[in-house]
Image: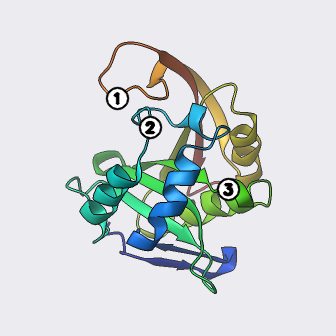
Amino acid sequence: MDFPAAYDAAAAGLLLRPYRVADVPSLVTNSNDAETRPFMAGTPAELTTKGLLEWVREIGSQRSPDPDRLSYAVADPATDELLAGVVIHVTRRRDVAELVFWVCADVRDRGVGTRVARASSELCFTRGIHRVELVIRPDDIRSRHLAKAVGFQREAHLREVLPGSGVSFGSNTERQDGELWAHLRTDA
């Protein structure tokens, strides 16, 4: 169940690859975007150039200290322009992966998020994952529509499962509810 450092999702017109130092300006802009920020659970209150540069260098080899947490930059394969980012959290003993992703503001509403979810799910399924999950805040209408379009099914309402934006994981304040959506390898 090894995942590659890069994944050419040609059918989706995307390249999942390691983050690069050249991505940092776009990461700073997009991680602090007013529409994206409220949905970035568990991240620091402000993401700075210095902090994101350190983060990119730390995960530049594509491997985080946790082998079951894979971070990919999502780029246009023709231009290498950063379009989005996705993290795949794998629970190997259950053959389950959770996707967490964001889309750059300048390509929002162009189907990039849908293509990222499809390509990431496809990658998981080709690596032996049986179930791919999304945990979506109930007020995140875009992500709910995207999940339906990709074939995810809403399964449950999870109370206080997500930390709020600007709150580190492990904090007991500002917890957010989430909806559990799942897509199985056996789904049509």
**Residue located beneath label 3 in the image:** 113
* Marking on residue 168: 1
Q: What residue type is labelled 2?
A: Glu
Residue at 48% over, 32% down: 41
Provide residue 108's location: percent of width, then percent of height.
74, 54
Which is more N-terminal, label 2 or label 3?
A: 2
- Quarter containing the N terminus: bottom left
Provide residue 28's location: percent of width, then percent of height.
50, 53
Q: Going by the image, does 149 lie left or right of 179?
A: right
In the image shown, does 164 or 130 lie closer to the viewer?
164
- State the separation of the CA atoms marked 3 and 2: 23 Å
Residue at 45% over, 63% down: 24
Callout 1: few (<14), some (14-19), or many (20+) C-alpha neighbours within 10 Å?
some
In the image shown, does 80 or 3 lie closer to the viewer?
80
Q: Going by the image, does 175 lie left or right of 62?
A: right
Is residue 51 at least partly visible in the picture? yes
Residues tagged 3 and 1 counted as in contact (Cβ below 8 A): no
* Marking on residue 46: 2
